[in-house]
Image (cartoon, helix red, strand yellow):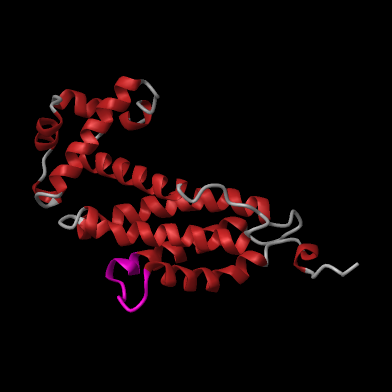
């Protein structure tokens, strides 16, 4: 088992040390390329020794992925709870949060963005799959024959791929306008998972 998996405890000392290392790495990435940054650079900036670093992370790539995954989780957490009776609204909010996250990356770390794009894409897609899996579990009909895992993977892949496109976005559209157009395209597929009685218009009394 990797050392990073062992040290996921909520011990305040562990959290503080990991935050120091992450902060040091982010600061260094604003100054030079990822290839130029060494574990020694990170530990010196964080004022911890190399033994401490390797007690928390296997290498600098593991530190980077942990930091980016934290950012992905925070971005998705801002969406709040996803509701089964507000599918269209919540899908737009979710896609908008992902687009805004990717739109902000070049601002937060302009030097390193192209080097860590593959890592952040993987992290965001995995976090998004977890969130969508729980949400679709509430929405989908228990009698549905659809492969929910495949649908979750397809939805998260489409959202993240569109978000990455926003790294090189068309300035003629705002981030929210682009997110709304993607959400509108995906919405029919999500609604198709709902029980048929929920899709039928209610009769007027």
Is the N terminus in the top left, top right, bottom left or bottom right quadrant? Answer: top left
Q: Position of residue 114 (x, y in %)?
A: 21, 60
Left of 60 or right of it: where is 167? Answer: right
Seen in the picture, residue 97 relative to 54 is either above or below; the reply is below
**In terms of image quadrants, where is residue 144?**
bottom right
Q: Residue at x 49, y 58 (%)?
A: 94
Is the C terminus in the top left, top right, bottom left or bottom right quadrant? Answer: bottom right
Check the image and name the residue furthest to the bottom: 172
Q: Residue at x 43, y 57 (%)?
A: 97
Q: Position of residue 74 (x, y in %)?
A: 40, 45
Q: Residue at x 34, y 21 (%)?
A: 12
Q: Position of residue 145 (x, y in %)?
A: 71, 61
The front one of 155 and 173 is 173
Check the image and name the residue furthest to the right: 205
**Bounds of the magenta span?**
164-174
Residue 59 shows in the view: no
Q: Is residue 168 magenta?
A: yes
């Amino acid at each position: 088992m990797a050392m990073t998996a062992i040290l996921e405890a909520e011990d305040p000392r562990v959290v503080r040390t990991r935050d120091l290392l992450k902060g040091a790495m982010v600061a260094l990435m604003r100054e030079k390329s990822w290839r130029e940054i060494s574990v020694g650079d990170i530990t010196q900036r964080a004022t911890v020794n190399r033994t401490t670093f390797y007690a928390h992370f296997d290498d600098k790539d593991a530190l980077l992925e942990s930091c980016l995954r934290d950012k992905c989780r925070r971005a998705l957490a801002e969406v709040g709870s996803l509701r089964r009776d507000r599918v269209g609204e919540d899908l737009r909010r979710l896609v908008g949060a992902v687009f805004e996250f990717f739109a902000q990356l070049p601002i937060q770390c302009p030097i390193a963005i192209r080097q860590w794009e593959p890592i952040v894409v993987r992290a965001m897609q995995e976090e998004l799959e977890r969130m969508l899996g729980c949400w679709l579990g509430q929405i989908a009909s228990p009698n549905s024959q659809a492969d929910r895992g495949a649908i979750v993977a397809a939805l998260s892949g489409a959202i993240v791929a569109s978000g990455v496109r926003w790294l090189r976005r068309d300035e003629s559209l705002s981030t929210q306008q682009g997110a709304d157009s993607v959400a509108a395209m995906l919405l029919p597929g999500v609604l198709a998972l709902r029980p048929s009685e929920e899709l039928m218009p209610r009769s007027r009394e």
